[in-house]
Structure formats: C-alpha cells, structure tokens
Amino acid sequence: MNKVHNYSAGPCILPEEVFQEAAESVLNFNNKNLSLIEMSHRSADFVEVMDEARELVKEILNVPENYEVLFLQGGASLGFLMTAYNMMRENKNGGYIVTGAWAKKAAKEAAFMGTSSIIASSEDKNFNYIPKNYEIPNNLDYLHFTSNNTIFGTQFKDLPKSESSFGL
C-alpha cells in the first residue's frame, strides 16, 4: 500500500514501525497483559515511558537542564490561558501582535486574567501581512506573537524589538 502524503499544518506521516509499536503497547505493554492506556499513571512502567519522553523532548529541542518539560491536555486555548496566568505578574498586562487565528485566540484567553493589549494587528486585511512600525509599551509583562501563521501563510522573519524587561 502506498502512503498518501498529508501536507496539512498539524499531522504528519509516520513510519510503519511507529504504528506497530503503538499498537502493541495498546494491546500488551511490556508483557504485562495490560495496555499502556490501562495502566496506572503512577506505575513504574508508565513513569518510565514519561521520563523517556521528557528526555527525548529535551534532547531533540535542546532544552536546558534547569527547565522542565510538561505534557498537558487542553489544547491551544488552555495553553494561551496558562501563559497569561503564569506571566501576567506585575502589571497584569500581556501584549499581543495579532496576525491570525492563533494570536487572536491567545489575546482572547489572556483577557480572562488581566489586560490583553493589542499592540498591532493585521486583521483589517484578513491577516495577510505582518504589521510593521508599532511600538511595544514598557508596561507589559510579556509579548505574544505567532511567528509562523500556518492558517494564513504569514511569518515573522525577525523577532519584534523591545526595550522592555522581557528581553526581546
């Protein structure tokens, strides 16, 4: 059977051996007569899987040892809210450069935690450009921008410049 190629933004083609190992893990993980998804998340076998996954992520992404890798459920919207929850500290103000659906959703979620300041936006032309000539205020706790907008096809070529304490 020839594989169909999927050029969508999210999913990718996986090698056959990945599916075979995953299928075996669902049927009988480590010869325990239980699937991995039936085991306690506190069992030694499951903890070993998670520890290995964290180490692989750190290795592949070159994550420094003084950082942790978290696997969380909830999708992008929860991630946007968690970012605001953890980063809106001093001024309760997050800055957003809105260049598409993801940045717009992030700004919306941040508004639940404090001020969601739209610094620049390209929504006026259906997100078909990256805004220029904007100023980043000094009263922001952080700045959010989506560097590669896969839905609308725009991409930041350079990081936004700022004098702010968050160091961009």
Image (spheres, grey):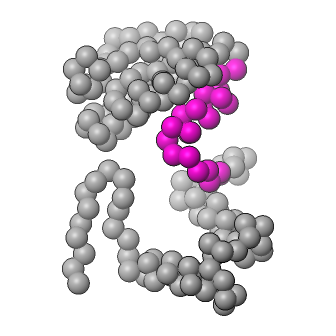
Does 73 appear above or below 104?
A: below
Q: Please state, as top left, top right, bottom left or bottom right, where the N terminus lies in the image.
A: bottom left
Which residue is located at x 65 percent, y 16 percent? 92
Residue stretch rendered in magenta on the structure: 69-89
Q: Position of residue 72 (x, y in %)?
A: 61, 50
- In the rendered structure, does residue 56 fall within the stretch colored magenta? no
Which residue is located at x 36 percent, y 58 percent? 11
Say which quarter of the image contains residue 5: bottom left
Does 165 appear above or below 33?
A: above
Residue 142 shows in this picture: no
Does 59 appear above or below 127?
A: below
Q: Position of residue 46 (x, y in %)?
A: 70, 71
Q: Position of residue 111 (x, y in %)?
A: 55, 20
Which residue is located at x 57 percent, y 14 percent? 115
Query: Taking 166 as reference, is 108 left or right?
Result: left
- What secondary structure is the magenta-colored segment mainly? helix
Q: Nearer the viewer, residue 161 or 130?
A: 130
Say which quarter of the image contains residue 98: top left
Does 34 appear above or below 55?
A: below
Say which quarter of the image contains residue 128: top left
Q: Nearer the viewer, residue 119 or 31?
A: 31
Which residue is located at x 55 percent, y 24 percent? 110
Q: Nearer the viewer, residue 66 or 69?
A: 69
The number of discs equals 0
Residue 65 shows in this picture: yes
Q: Position of residue 94 (x, y in %)?
A: 56, 19
